Image (cartoon, grey):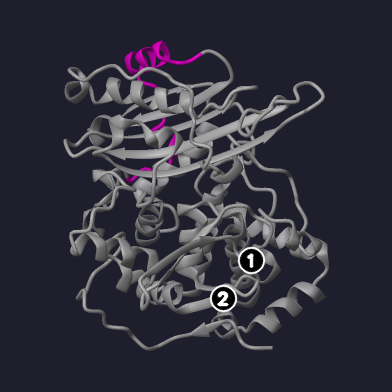
Amino acid sequence: MKKKYILIITCIVLSLGFVKYPIDGYEYSGIKRLYQIRKMRLDSIKYGRIPAGAYKKLRDIQLNLTNKTTDSIHDLLIADVNFERKIKQITPEGNFSFAVMDMSKPDNLRYASHRENVGYQPGSVAKIAVLLAVFDQLQKLCPDSYEDRVSYLKNIRVTSRYWGLGDEHTIPIYDIEKNKLIKRQVVANDEFSLFEWLDHMVSVSNNGAASIMYREAILMAAFGQEYFSLDAEKAENYFKNTPRNVLTNLANTVVNEPLRKLGIAEDEYRLGGMFTRGPEKYVGRKGGSIGTTKGLMKFLVKLEQGKAVDKESSLEMKRLLYMTDRRIRYAKSPRLDNAAVYFKSGSLYKCDKTKNPNCAKYAGNVFNFMNSIIIVEHPNGIKYIVCLMSNVLNKNSAGAHLYLASKIDDLINVKENIKKSEIKEIDYKDEKDTN
């Protein structure tokens, strides 16, 4: 079998000069879709898919809470009574939970929450657990060199095989030589770098990419330094020949133990298994997946502290969360157009057609989870985190998420927004939002 785990040591020098990531980061990361956007910008070609706030450069992305050195996350999640009162005044009725932290003044944080301990099925928001697991394993393999970790992310290429199949989400595939971009579902022989698979997992929320990177985190844990020369055949034999219960326990530890190290309890945030069905013949589910806004807030605060693995890993994960693709749901609020947003959304719904034959996508009548986590950074220095989870039946809650995003921004970014027209809640029509 052809080796699929290939460490490429050659460097490609492009006519753009030395540029980095996010949009100016193709040479740093090797994520090809960034090259196209960057090239269009350099060639003065109009690109209307992303708003003004999506053009931050690598050097501009920073962590906001590195001065908060406390290891106790509970010391930072203390409710500000006045702030919480104002937030609750704009809270919609129904099954909504949220946590909000205003980081505009790091020495005077403001925190508010509503039903922060209520558990929801996290959907694709759970992919940040895979993101954390990958960086946790890379730190264990390369504890003394972050540059080596980045090199492996960029240069190790792996194929999808059955792990990436069965997801309706498409991925962007850009041919630099032909300057051609196509979007399609993952196929078995797709081969990308670890960096690109991570980008597919986060930016377009591809479930197959999430299972593939979950697989890679397991293999890093199982093979240690041998991972860097591992080929696809040996990797597949490992899954075929290892008892299913052993694989299931290892997978559960790999993806959840890093969350526990951050002070996130099992009932606050956990991932129970893969995102596609193919791998489940070898790796079972365990414990189920759950998310609370408090658990998700803990992750993002630790990220901003530089304590999600370490400072370099935290910053890299934040870069991967930085939106340089079209914005949806909560992030689609016009109030955020000029802001940098670091975002992940997730949904899961179920329809009982016997109760309502017209039950629609994202409007389930059995359950209808929709979740958003976001870091917002305005040019005027207003910075805040929001974790929002909902389970509102028979309605696409994306419109409510967008509306609440606008109201929260009006409350925190009050001087900037006070003269702007009010944004009203409307029905959400974008059927392409499939995160």
- Give residue 108's position: percent from left, percent from top: 25, 29
- Give residue 68's position: percent from left, percent from top: 31, 42
Vertical relation: 189 (above or below) 25: below
Mark toward the viewer: 2 or 1: 2
Vertical relation: 96 (above or below) 208: above
Assign the C terminus to one quadrant of the image.
Answer: top right
The residue to which callout 1 is attached is 215
Vertical relation: 285 (above or below) 413: below
Quarter of image, res 51? top left
Q: Which mark is residue 136?
A: none
Does the magenta run of residues contain 82?
A: yes
Q: Amino acid at mark 1?
A: Arg
Q: Residues within 10 Å of mark 1 (few under 14, many from 20)?
A: many
Q: Amino acid at mark 2?
A: Val
- Give residue 278's position: percent from left, percent from top: 74, 61
The residue lying toward the viewer, choosing from 41 and 26, is 41
Residue occupying the point 33% across, 20% down: 423
Q: Which mark is residue 158?
A: 2
The answer to whether any part of residue 71 appears in the image is: no
Residue occupying the point 65% across, 30% down: 360
The magenta segment: 69-92
Q: Do the CB atoms of the residues marked 2 and 1 lie less than 8 Å apart?
A: no
The answer to whether any part of residue 51 appears in the image is: yes
How far apart marks 2 and 1 lie (CA) works out to: 11 Å
